[in-house]
Amino acid sequence: MAHRDAVSAAVLRNLAAEIFEVSPDEITERAAFYEDLGIDSVQKVEFVVRVERQFGVRLTDEEAAGLQDFGDALTVLRNRGISVGP
C-alpha cells in the first residue's frame, strides 16, 4: 500500500494502465478515459475502488463521477491532502 500522504503519479498511472489494459505511456493527464483510452464503466468503477483501497481515501459519488481523465484523479487526490509527485 502506498503511503497515504505521498504517492508517485507513476504508481497511479501504472494502476490505471493495468485496469484499463493500456500502456502506461497512454495515460497522460488529459487522456480522456472513455474517448481516448476506450474504457467502459466497469473499468472506471474498478479504478475508483482500487484508488480508494490503495490510497486510503473514500471518494464521494460526485468525485467518482467527475473523473473524466487521469488529471482529474490526480486533482482529487491532491484535494484530499495526498501529495502526488512525479
Image: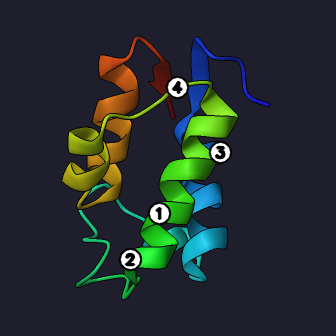
- Toward which corner of the image does residue 28 lie, by quadrant? bottom left
Residue on which disc 3 sits = 11
Q: Which mark is residue 41?
A: 2
Q: Residue at x 28, y 80 (%)?
A: 34
Closest to the observer: 77 or 71?
77
Q: Closer to the N terminus: mark 2 or mark 4?
A: 2
- Along the horizontal axis of the image, is 20 left or right of 2? left
Identify the secondary structure beneath mark 1: helix
- Of badges 3 and 4, the one in the foreground is 4
Amino acid on which disc 3 is placed: Val
Identify the secondary structure beneath mark 4: loop
Distance from Cα at disc 3 to Cα at disc 1 = 18 Å
Q: Which mark is residue 45?
A: 1
Amino acid on which disc 1 is placed: Val
Q: Closer to the N terminus: mark 3 or mark 4?
A: 3
Judge whether residue 10 can be spotted in this image.
Answer: no
Could you say where residue 57 lies in the image, as x and y percent from the top left? 52, 25
Amino acid on which disc 4 is placed: Val
Amino acid on which disc 2 is placed: Ser
Q: Residue at x 65, y 45 (%)?
A: 11
The answer to whether the residue labelled 1 contacts the one labelled 2, judged by CB atoms less than 8 Å apart, is: yes
Q: Closer to the N terminus: mark 1 or mark 4?
A: 1
Q: Closer to the N terminus: mark 3 or mark 1?
A: 3
Closest to the observer: 58 or 29?
58
